[in-house]
Amino acid sequence: MRAVVYLGHGRVGLRDMPAPAIQAPTDALVRVRMAGICGTDLHAVAGHFQGMEIGSVVGHEFVGEIIETGGAVTRFRRGDQVMASDFTSCGHCHHCTAGDNWQCSERSFFGTGTAFGPALAGAQAEIVRVPHADSTLYAIPKGVSDEAAILVGDNLATGWAAIERGRMQPGDIVVVIGGGAVGQLTSLAAQAGGAGAVLLIEPNEQRRAFARTHGAIAASPDAASGLLHQLSGGRGAELVVEAVGIPKVLSQAFDLVGRRGSVISVGAHSERQWPIPLADCFTREISIGFAIGDSIRLRPRLLKMIATGILDPTVVVDRHVGFDEVVSAYDELRAQTSMKTVINL
């Protein structure tokens, strides 16, 4: 089968790989129809995650058709059209039954080495093996496009998890740092949740213009503090979401959050240590948190919001490519000349 593989030092390539096979009774094989390229993939191929071996299949966002199931799979059968979470979970442990699927001890993350669990081949391939298929996969509802399903599997779930974790209330002023797909979808999620205003901070003017078109107030990093001061009367934001994954950017969030506000990071961080302004956070009673887009918990709610027109995550998809264009698509995403690319197989 054809697949996109990690070649080291920020490089990917298209290669012929052996097709996966069922390894456990809870596995399913999915013939991929569409796969997404995500900012997390850029981290993976840049070598930011441990255990990325040369020749590993990358990618973690996909939809497709089930072509085979293990004997213990009960919810799906051959021919079913499915979407997937970007990680696997067993579906029955303490954390899974509590809705905290990301904390499952049997978690694996597609195409990201061993940084988040045992290595699992990625989804930018013609066929992908899906462990714990009954929990990891979900039937695509009627009226939901492949693009929307892919985004629910990761980027939109991440944006919604940010406002959920930050306990955003209607009328709150929300700042989103980073105008990539996750940042833009965080903005849309906050607006759908009733934010009084969303200020998106992004150095790229094209991405700022996109945010303005879709309901946010946008500013360059240099202009953000002054604009936030005007919006909040000098009080700062109730919630600041960092959607970049760079410690320096996360540190800047504390200059924007107001007293008793929350700073939530959804960036894919790999650094072991990060200094925080401890005394200031104590004095101002700042809450600090991190959020993972747990699609398994959130997808029923998000899919209903998409079906009713409250949210349309597909607005961030600005490029469709075939396998032969994947290398250039990675380059464009890295150069920020595209926002969200999907691969049509």
Image: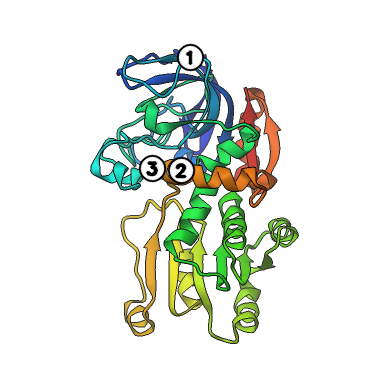
Tell me the CA gap for discs 1 and 2: 23 Å
- Within 10 Å of disc 1 (Cα), the crowding (few <14, some 14-19, many 20+) is few
Name the residue located 65 percent from the left edge and 23 percent from the top edge.
324
From the viewer's perspective, is the residue at label 1 or at label 3 nearer? 1
Instruction: Residue under label 1, please give it.
Output: 78
Q: Nearer the viewer, residue 93 or 88?
A: 93
Residue 59 in picture, x, y percent from top left:
49, 33
Q: What amino acid is at disc 2?
A: Ser
Colour style of the rendered protein structure: rainbow
Instruction: Residue under label 3, please give it.
Output: 49
Residue 217 visible in this rendered orientation of the protein: yes
Q: What amino acid is at disc 3?
A: Phe
Which of the numbered marks, if any, corresponds to residue 173? none
Vertical placement of residue 245 versus 275, above or below = above
- Within 10 Å of disc 2 (Cα), the crowding (few <14, some 14-19, many 20+) is many
Name the residue located 68 percent from the left edge and 30 percent from the top edge.
321
- Mark 1 and mark 2 lie on one chain; the one further toward the N terminus is 1
From the viewer's perspective, is the residue at label 1 or at label 2 nearer? 1
Name the residue located 53 percent from the left edge and 76 percent from the top edge.
237
- Within 10 Å of disc 3 (Cα), the crowding (few <14, some 14-19, many 20+) is some
Residue 36 in picture, x, y percent from top left:
57, 35
In screen coordinates, is 34 left or right of 121? Answer: right
Instruction: Residue under label 2, please give it.
Output: 295
Tell me the CA gap for discs 3 and 2: 21 Å
- Badge 1 marks a residue whose secondary structure is loop
